[in-house]
């Protein structure tokens, strides 16, 4: 049987994260969400956009996850750095082609040993609530979330 690389997250894990994250949003009564799950190489594994999710939500969600993955830091730490080092974060955004959004809602997905397997970006409600949903989705898949704040 041939074995193929997963580049971090499997499709089953990515789908489990997205499904559970959306379920958490419904449980909390949030605005319609868009969830993007990236593998360790920054490639899309799953995208789910709820009915009513506004026009640029997929791009914002991608930017949250992509920024976290690009820097190896959760969105909360990226937000702190954006406040403290605006010039650097502007350069990062330029280098990333505008795809790095340094706010909560971009969460790294790690295994039990702390190895980064990918990232989740969610957009649709306020960033802190987007992050809650990302963390719930990651936990439901049996993985560890890195938000950029100490545990």
Image (cartoon, rainbow, N blue to C red):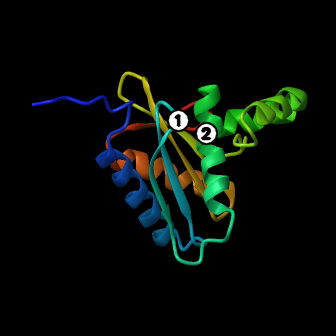
- The image quadrant that residue 10 belongs to is top left
Is 44 situated above or below 86?
below
- Up-down: is 6 above or below 139? above
Asked whether residue 55 appears in the rendered view, the answer is: yes
Q: How crowded is mark 1: few (under 14 residues within 10 Å), some or many (20 or more)?
A: some
For numbered disc 2, what is the local secondary structure? helix
Whether residue 105 is visible to the viewer of this picture, yes or no, is no
Q: Position of residue 78 (x, y in %)?
A: 71, 34
The relative height of residue 84 versus residue 10 in the rendered view (above or below) is above
From the viewer's perspective, tell me whether residue 106 is left or right of residue 46.
Answer: right
Q: Position of residue 105 (x, y in %)?
A: 61, 49
Q: In this view of the protein, which residue sits in the foreground, 88 or 73?
A: 88
Residues at marks 1 and 2, CA–CA distance in whole angstroms: 7 Å
Residue ID at (46%, 64%) = 22
Q: Helix or strand or loop: what does disc 1 sit on?
A: loop
Residue 83: image location, x then y, percent? 85, 35
Residue that appears at 51% across and 56% down: 133
Do tag 1 and tag 2 residues touch (Cβ < 8 Å)? Answer: yes
Q: Is residue 40 above or below residue 27?
A: above
Relative to residue 17, is residue 41 drawn left or right? right
In screen coordinates, is 3 left or right of 142? left
Return the residue found at the far bottom. 52
- Residue hosting label 2: 66
Residue at mark 1: 42
Label whose residue precedes the other's in the sequence (1 or 2): 1
Looking at the image, which residue sits at the far front? 2
Q: Residue farthest to the left?
A: 1
């Amino acid at each position: 049987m041939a074995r193929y690389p997963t580049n971090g997250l499997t499709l089953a894990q990515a789908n489990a994260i997205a499904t559970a994250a959306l379920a958490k949003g419904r449980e909390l009564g949030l605005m319609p969400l868009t969830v993007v799950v990236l593998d360790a190489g920054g490639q899309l594994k799953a995208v789910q956009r709820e009915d009513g999710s506004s026009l640029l939500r997929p791009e914002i969600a991608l930017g949250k996850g992509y920024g976290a993955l690009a820097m190896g830091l959760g969105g909360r730490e990226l937000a702190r750095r954006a406040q403290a080092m605006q010039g650097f974060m502007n350069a990062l955004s330029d280098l990333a082609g505008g795809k790095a959004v340094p706010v909560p809602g971009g969460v790294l997905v790690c295994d039990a040993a702390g190895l980064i397997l990918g990232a989740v970006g969610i957009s649709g409600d306020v960033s802190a609530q987007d992050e809650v949903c990302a963390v719930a989705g990651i936990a439901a898949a049996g993985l560890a979330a890195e938000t950029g704040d100490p545990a």
